[in-house]
Image (spheres, rainbow, N blue to C red):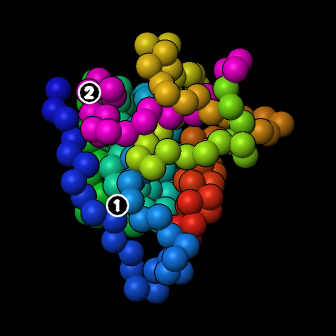
Amino acid sequence: MARVSTMMDMRFLPDAAPTPGRCDARGFASIGLYAPKSKDNVGGVLRAAKIFGSKLVVVAKSRLRNEASNVMQTHRHIPVLETDDLLACRPWHSQLVVVECVPGAQELHTFTHPTSAFYVFGPEDGSVPNHITEKAQHVIRLRAWHCLNLAATVNVVLHDRVSKRGLG
């Protein structure tokens, strides 16, 4: 499988530029989706990727095509890859962060995001497979009374990253 280069630089829109001195603009956030079920949720993930400055979205074991809810046409701005092997598309020098509700997972509110991260999210009706979770440097979870849908979870994690790293 192909490797994805991380040589993309981080760019900000002039009206969204971070406050000088507050921003650590090094690194990147990329997203991996394992077997997403809902077109609307994938469209919501693509929108979140663009809004929160992700540099790549990788979709493995996809069960769908043509996300109508991708109203921002994210694929025109951010590479979106389809693959059978999510880990083969993990960007170089990124830390694997699996977002999953499993025993021992660190809660998001206490998590320090790595400079360069590949966040992996499971399907709405399942979990990230063990062979991926076992290779993760970090496994995190959100504190909630019930499970959030895929798009909502991605939005929360990316917003947390941007907020904690001073990029917003």
Residue 37 in view here: no
Of tags 1 and 2, which is closer to the observer? 2
Is residue 9 left or right of 163 when viewed as pictured? left
Which quadrant of the rendered structure holds the N terminus?
A: top left
Up the image or down, 159 lies above or below 154; here it is below
The stretch in magenta equals: 85-104
Image location (x, y in percent) of residue 14: 40, 85
Image point (39%, 53%), residue name:
28
- Check disc 2 and report its element: helix, strand or loop: helix
Residue 147 belongs to the span the image colors magenta: no
Residue that mark 2 sits on? 88
- In front here: 71 or 21? 21
Image point (55%, 73%), residue name:
22
Image point (42%, 36%), residue name:
95
The quadrant where residue 103 appears: top right
Residue that mark 1 sits on? 74
Q: CA distance from mark 1 to mark 2?
A: 22 Å
